[in-house]
Amino acid sequence: MNLDLVRQEFGAGIMGLRTAPDAITVEASREILIPLLRFLKEEEEFACDFLTDLCGVDCLPAVPRFRVVYHLYSCRRKHRLRVKVPLTEKEPVIDSCLSLWAGADWLERECFDLFGIIFKGHPNLRRILLPLDFTGHPLRKDFPLAGDSEQ
């Protein structure tokens, strides 16, 4: 994969590029997320046509606190690519990638439910695993270990 294409196309929006045996990781700002994902899907060099997973990570006490991680795969080229986008605790909002991969629907809802990350433009962003009246987001590192009930 020619990662220089990504750097040329997105410049300052790319915060880091790392290679590892299992996948290449691109760290990007949320402002370029959708154009970047579209580029990685449509550019022949990458052809990442399959969103295998999307998840949240709470990096507390680090700042920015959250990461949304997109795991992409190219069925044609047989390679993996990971895209990480940092989000602040104050504004855990990111654009939905549902227009690129319909399979992101439940993955974004799960991330919203468990971490409280808001996917702007998602047509049905509501809890998927927990009861609708549940308070909080249990995969956040500051969520009480005993749950949100009074002791």
Image (tube, rainbow, N blue to C red):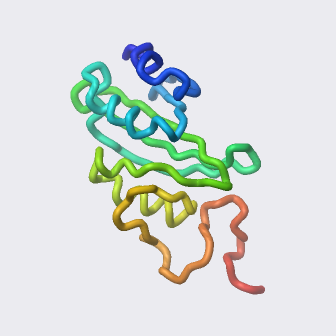
Left/right of residue 121 with respect to residue 136 in the rendered view: left
Left/right of residue 135 with respect to residue 8 in the rendered view: right
The x and y percentages for residue 54 are 43, 48
Which one is in front, 138 or 120? 120
Left/right of residue 124 with respect to residue 26 in the rendered view: left
The x and y percentages for residue 80 are 38, 30
> In percent of the image, x 49 and y 80: which residue is there?
131
**Residue 138 against residue 61 in the figure, above or below:** below
> In percent of the image, x 72 and y 50: which residue is there?
60
**Residue 95 against residue 37 in the figure, above or below:** below
The x and y percentages for residue 17 are 53, 23
**Residue 136 against residue 77 in the figure, above or below:** below
- Image-quadrant location for residue 29: top right
Q: Quadrant of the N terminus?
A: top left
Q: Quadrant of the C terminus?
A: bottom right
- Image-quadrant location for residue 48: top left
Which one is in front, 130 or 16? 16
Which one is in front, 13 or 21? 13
The x and y percentages for residue 114 are 54, 64
> In percent of the image, x 34 and y 58: which residue is there?
105
Circle count: 0
> In percent of the image, x 42 and y 70: which residue is there?
128
Left/right of residue 35 with respect to residue 78 in the rendered view: right
Farthest residue, direction left: 76
- Image-quadrant location for residue 40: top left
**Residue 121 against residue 70 in the figure, above or below:** below
